[in-house]
Amino acid sequence: MRELHGPLRWVCWAWAAAAAAVHLYFGGTGFPEPIQMRGFHLLVFTPLLFLLYPATKRSPRHRPSVPDWIWAAASAAPHAWVMWNWMAVADRMEYVDAFTPLMMALGITAIVTLLEAIRRAVEPGLAWMVAGSLAYMQWGYLVPGVFNARPFTPAEIVEASWLVPTAGGVYGPLTGIVATTIAVFILFGSFMQGSGTGRLFSNLGAAVAGRYSGGPAKVAVVTSGLFGTMSGSSVSNVITTGAMTIPLMTRIGYRPAVAGGIESAASVGGALMPPVMGAAAFVMAEITNIPYGDIVVAAALGAVLYYFAILAAVHFEAKKLGIAPMPLKDIPAWREVLADAHLVLPIAVLVWLMMERWSGNFAAFCATVAMVAVAMLKARTRMSARAIVESLAQAGLTMAPLAVSIAGAGIVVSALTATGMVVAFGGIIKGLAGGNLGLLLVLLALTVLVLGLGIPTTPSYIIAAAIGVPQVLELGRPLGVDPLQAHMFTFYFAVIADATPPVAAAAFAAAAIAKASPTITSVHATRFGIAGFTVGFAFIYDPGIMLRGGLAEILTATATQVVALTLITSSYAGYLLAPVAWPIRLLMGLAGLAAAFGYVFTDPARLALGVGMLAAVAGVQWAAGRTARREQGDER
């Protein structure tokens, strides 16, 4: 992003703040007609990206060029026209009423400027995917076999991609959920940071975990998980917390790539952590019509297990390397933590309102207002007028790239649906699986991870859900798999794709801070985030992990995951109560994998296998340690 100076910097800052403020106002008072709101959302954010993000490395870094201003003006024109003519757009019959030459010109302009905004501000890979979807609509009829599509005229392609708000495209439901609910939650997160809640989380993490072996790494895990409830972005989470935690971890003995892997795995998990999960979770609520509160409940235990696994891996790694706790002088006193404790109240307001089934946008609006009010209770957290405007501006700057990325994903979904690619690709996955649900899940997981190579979490989840979820529901019918289970599975793999090689946005950001190899860092991030894989499959086969069923089912599913993850992380680190030799490490790893993924066995059998292996190794090490201590005592 450019470093603007002078009046233009303040103009862009005020622009972003005003746009965010309007979204917040609508969140509390009610939104305009959907097409109006979606047009306004893209009108205020798309032009801003051309002023803030340079076109190439050679473009001016401190000011927009003349072509940038032209791009910005061109990007505004289609959305301004839609806002002005919203009644005509809302009333027209799609593919029946005339698609005029003016509409054609504006539609092409909207698509081209959207592609360029995505290329600059989000990911070139996503821009190429959107362009490829449009190309497939144009020339898919030339493709033989199962991927053959019917011919589309250029007018049909542009109309489907731009002016069909009921199905997909630029103004489809995906843009709608971003312009309403997600936008207000982003505002809540921004005000959390502006009020000092970030300081509360940082101090709490240090106070809770800093006194234990490998303290700085455990602080990074706890803090990143808490920060993730605010940011919803794994990369921004890495940059915010990693700038402090990664250098500290490397100074006390962690290898740079390991430190980066710990931070990126912890930061990625922030999108899994209720109550404010990532944008993809809100899209899930929109797609499935499942209340967001139900999604939060279903995700809670899985998120705890994800962070348990990272903490366990960090603990074993620290014990093996002999890494000490944080120096006492660097650990904040509990009175310092409690001085900001009142900032938890707005989060409680948010959770209560969502549990009471209020709309997400109204709950986030009330929590945001409560955050400003509660922060006023103490001088150290009181937000000045400048701080409020800066929080609004930061929220606007966060919304802008998300706005175009989701609009681009809407075009992809529209193309997949119109051409029948969803059915074709889903049929291919189903055919490769041969009617086996487990193999289908593996193929879908790989699909999501591959999509994550070039596009962000939310578009990746949207596309993969369109392709794979219907197949999972069909093959999972004998097990009673429901839409929430299938979507949670897809959601988890879309999230952890940010940390898996060969291209992992969060791990690459952490590697830059750690001055380590991005690929090696992403490998470590994957092994620290191993629970993302085990919990993802548990959503399908162990619904107790979603707090479903009786107490026995929930406890069995949780205990199995805890034991399996302990075995896997201990095996990788080579340490349990003491160093573990390679043959035993291999057996522990295999037992952990069998307990986590061995769904051909009964749940009690998987749990017994894991507990037996863990107890055997721990018992032998404890006895050996006791004997060694006795012998040392005799020698003295």
Image (cartoon, rainbow, N blue to C red):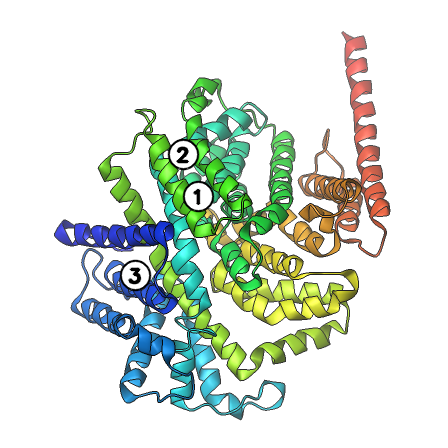
Q: Amino acid at mark 3?
A: Phe
Task: Tell me residue 165's x, y (percent).
Answer: 42, 73
- Element type where label 3 sits in the image: helix
Q: Position of residue 415 (x, y in %)?
A: 49, 79
- Which residue appears farthest toward the left when viewing the image? 7
Relative placement, left or right, of 230 versus 452 is: left
Q: Is residue 181 above or below residue 39?
A: above
CA gap between label 2 and label 3 equals 27 Å
- Place of residue 601 in the rendered image (x, y in percent of width and height, measured from the top left): 85, 53
**Which picture quadrant has residue 301?**
top right
Marks 1/2: CA distance? Answer: 9 Å
Are discs 1 and 2 less than 8 Å apart at CB? yes
Which residue position holds label 2?
Answer: 197
| Disc 1 element | helix
Dot 2: element: helix
Q: Which residue is mark 3?
A: 45
Q: Residue at x 43, y 54 (%)?
A: 182
Residue with the mark numbered 1: 230
Q: CA distance from mark 3 to mark 1?
A: 21 Å
